[in-house]
Image (cartoon, helix red, strand yellow):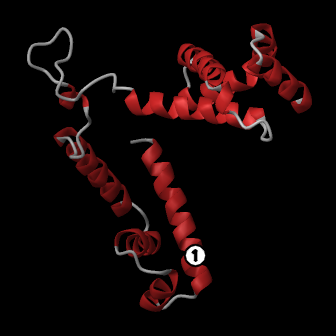
Amino acid sequence: MEILVKKRIKQVLKGDQDAYAEIVEIYKDKVFHICYRMLANQHEAEDIAQEAFLRAYVNINSFNIDLKFSTWLYRIATNLCIDRIRKKKPDYYLDAEVAGTEGLTMYSQIPSDTRLPEDDVQSLELQETIQKEISKLPEKYRSVIVLKYIEELSLKEISETLNLPLGTVKTRIHRGREALRNQLRYV
């Protein structure tokens, strides 16, 4: 393939434009795919691919015939894509006014990091509900659930605190969670 391309390049250097059309035919899909992967836009990729072939044709005299033509052509295409990406302006500006509003900018569309008061109220209500349901658990389950999930003690610490075997603590936590889950289903 490369031998054929070099033969066509020599013909182009002698003024045969049809020979360059064959070169374009050989590489057009690959160059387009390179451009498309870099730009993620079909129309821009087509434009840049066409520009790459044009630049290669105009600068064919500077091509070193001992090197691989495809590498040279792909570099031209890649550099043109990089230039396009650098020159491309953003589609919007944060201080631009939102269409159909008066004085509202794009800054207002950025979500806030702070919690909404409604979220805090819901969280408090959920905590109260869970606390109320925990208090309804039998004492043996309530104590391990409180120590594990509210006081955040390890299983070993709970075992030592309640003077219970580790296996009993695990069983009570499991059964307490199940009981709590069942109670919360009906709330």
Task: Choose top left, top right, bottom left or bottom right for residue 96.
Answer: top left
Q: Position of residue 145 (x, y in %)?
A: 43, 69
Single out the residue that lies furthest toward the front.
14
Viewport quadrant of the N terminus: top right
Q: 74 above or below 178?
A: above
| Residue in view at x 20 percent, y 44 percent | 121
Left or right: residue 36 compared with residue 92: right
Q: Position of residue 67 (x, y in %)?
A: 77, 41
Q: Nearer the viewer, residue 96 or 62?
A: 62
What secondary structure is found at the residue carrying circle 1? helix
Left or right: residue 9 compared with residue 160: right
Q: Nearer the viewer, residue 138 or 3?
A: 3
Q: Position of residue 61 (x, y in %)?
A: 67, 28
Viewport quadrant of the C terminus: top left
Q: Nearer the viewer, residue 104 or 25?
A: 25
| Residue in view at x 16 percent, y 27 percent | 95
Task: Choose top left, top right, bottom left or bottom right for residue 111.
Answer: top left
Amino acid at the residue labelled 1: Lys
| Residue in view at x 8 percent, y 18 percent | 103
Q: 92 above or below 153?
A: above
- Residue underneath mark 1: 170
Q: Position of residue 73 (x, y in %)?
A: 68, 30
Left or right: residue 113 compared with residue 156: left
